[in-house]
Amino acid sequence: MLPGSLASMLGSSGHASSLIAGGSGAAGSSGLAAGGTLKLNGRSLNIIRLLGEGGFSFVYLARDKASGRDFALKQMRCPSGTPTLRLALAEIETTRRFRSPHIIRLLDSCVEQTADGHIVYLFLPLFRGNAQDEINARAVRGESANEKHVLLVFRGAARGLKAMHQYRLPNVGAQREQQEAQMQAHSREDLESHDQQLPVPASQDDEDDSDSRRLIDGHEGADDEDDGSYPPKPRPEMTTSSLQMNNEQETGREGDLVPWAHRDIKPANIMIAQERQADGTLAEPVAVLMDFGSALRGRIHIKSRREAIMQQDLAAEHSSMPYRAPELFDVKTDAKLDEKVDIWSLGATLFAHLYGYSPFETPQIVEQGGSVAMTVQTGTWKFPEPASSTHSQATKDIIRRCLVLDPKKRPDIDEVLELTEKALRALA
């Protein structure tokens, strides 16, 4: 069975989907039966099986009937009277905002109105593992981590964060012109037959000058143009409300720096693809960040106690405790939160990928019933012995630099990447 961590994937927005056939498998509370067929924006998908579920969402293995390719289909049930639809659309918008081969790409989506609310469907690339899966597999086999592999995964995650931490406001006028052009193109396409065989999406083993572009797409920023790839891009008329929401949030001038923070960096949110090459060896791993339900503007000035409590509550709900930055546990009035919360989480994630657990949720802490929150807030941690003796000082220095209590003294994402390249060179 594919990893249940796929249940936290999310992506974009659209409209009008309908179930067109049932299956013999159990549908459960989600309403999608294994063996059934779903029509998504005019395309037929076979529902193979449920991969995982969590909260108000379900993730299925879905197969495109035309191409035979497998994808992850996320179904989010949003009952009326709850904030779930707003949260889903906000996460959709956040995921679409960032352009990086190391951030999961939404392939297609739609929103279906039901008698008791809405159902949001998101069509995503299918990954067969993440960093947490690797940790679990190593534990079962009794193996230690491959330091170079872990660093390559870490570098990919850091590159994804760079797109968030250094996000700049786009040219909204150009976006609108592009939408109008796409709308006209889609109108012409509607007059043509839809019975043609759809192109297969870019293969993960296509050759490219970038290791990460082999994974999902033939070129960066492909969401901006209709390149004939499958699945089809959401039609412009379906995303108007999302664009308006984006414009309302993105106040400022074109090119202004507006850092964002992921706020839930952890091994389970770093998907990994690694292809086997023609000679039988494995290519370098490609890491892709996912799950943007926790993402917020990076720099927030806490002006009142009410705002402080709100930020604490958000962190408690969306940021996993063993990887959560200490400043999010007890937010003070007049505090200034920033994207450095992710740097702390990166350090804890690198530690976990190397040693099998967060530095603040060690086997000793768990056995003794210790407080993870207290351990994080005091910055109490150490490298395990003798396991850490086999790893380079350059790699351990990355962890030391990231896990600094004072966020002002933590490195920014560019420095983290420099430290990572230094560590990789040391292993060459």
Image (tube, rainbow, N blue to C red):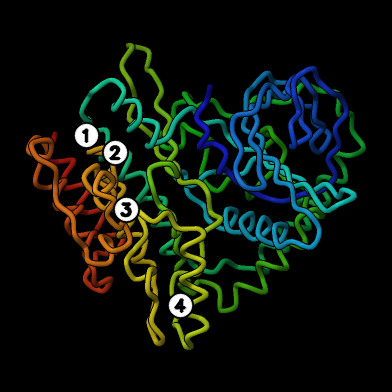
Count of picture labels: 4
**SS class, disc 1:** helix
Kindly identify which numbered label has been placed on residue 346: 3
Q: Residue at x 47, y 44 (%)?
A: 101
Q: Establish if 22 lies above or below 94.
A: above
Residue 210 visible in image? no
- Residue mark closest to the camera, 4 vs 2: 4
- Kind of residue sitting beneath label 3: Leu
Q: Is mark 2 on a helix, strand or loop?
A: helix
Instruction: Assess disc 1: are there few (<14), some (14-19) or many (≥20) residues with their C-alpha within 10 Å of its C-alpha.
Output: some
SS at badge 4: strand
Question: Where is mark 2, residue-wise?
Answer: 152
Cα distance, mark 4 to mark 3? 20 Å
Quadrant of the rendering where the C terminus is positioned: top left
Please rate how many residues cluster around mark 2, counting C-alpha atoms within 10 Å: few if below 14, some from 14 to 19, many from 20.
some
Evaluate if marks 1 and 4 touch, with contact meaning CB atoms under 8 Å apart.
no
* Mark 1 lies on residue: 148
The outermost residue toward the right is: 191
